[in-house]
Image (cartoon, rainbow, N blue to C red):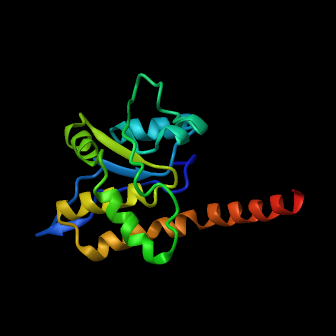
Amino acid sequence: LETTQNTRELGGYVIRDGLATKRNSLWRSDVQNYPSEKDIALLKERGITTILDLRGDKDLARKPSGFANREDFTYINCPIIEGSGIPESVEKVPVSYLAIAQAEHMPKVFRTIANAESGVMINCTAGKDRTGIISALVMSVAGVCDNDIACDYSLSRALLLRVFQSHRQFSTMTSFCG
């Protein structure tokens, strides 16, 4: 999508005997605050009509989803608060990811994906941790090999590197101004 940094579909991964995960059934993304008409058209063309937003109330108030009030998409907010902050240390990352996997609303997330009439796009703020763990779990259940799951997960770092660098540069500039 032209208005996001970390969006991709999870279809096309080989699972066994020449079978692959279904195309355009599940996409993962960072937040879509202002989807362009081109993005809207692409999603509709690919059959992605359910948007599953994992962000909590504070994030929604600060940056509402561009899909929240659209009649041509089903927008569902299912907050996964667990793992939404930055872990205190590298050692705490696995604990954070386990908390995401065991989140209170995780059953609703999977029911929403399973019962959607057509394709689903899940997102959190960066599309990396909460969205990444859910994507990894779905891919694992579908039979995608661990290496492909890890490769998909690691794509977020490359896709978000420019955003992180820009944020770091802005933070450094503002610290000199204050």
Task: Residue at 30%, 58% (x, y): give it.
Answer: 101
Q: Nearer the viewer, residue 169 or 178?
A: 178
Q: Residue 165 at what x, y percent from top left?
A: 68, 67
Please identify the residue farthest to the right as the structure is shown.
Answer: 177
Task: Residue at 54%, 42% (x, y): give it.
Answer: 59
Q: Nearer the viewer, residue 170 or 92?
A: 92
In the displayed structure, does residue 143 sit left or right of residue 50? Answer: left
In the displayed structure, does residue 144 sit left or right of residue 32? Answer: left
Task: Residue at 28%, 48% (x, y): give it.
Answer: 106
Q: Residue 171 at what x, y percent from top left?
A: 75, 61
**The C terminus lies in quadrant:** bottom right
Please identify the residue farthest to the left as the structure is shown.
Answer: 17
Q: Nearer the viewer, residue 57 or 167?
A: 57
Task: Residue at 40%, 42% (x, y): give it.
Answer: 79
Q: Is residue 165 above or below residue 126?
A: below
Looking at the image, how many numbered discs can be counted on the residues? 0
Q: Nearer the viewer, residue 32 or 9?
A: 32
Q: Residue 37 at what x, y percent from top left?
A: 54, 34
| Picture quadrant of residue 168 | bottom right
In the displayed structure, does residue 177 sit left or right of residue 39? Answer: right
Q: Residue 116 at what x, y percent from top left?
A: 24, 36
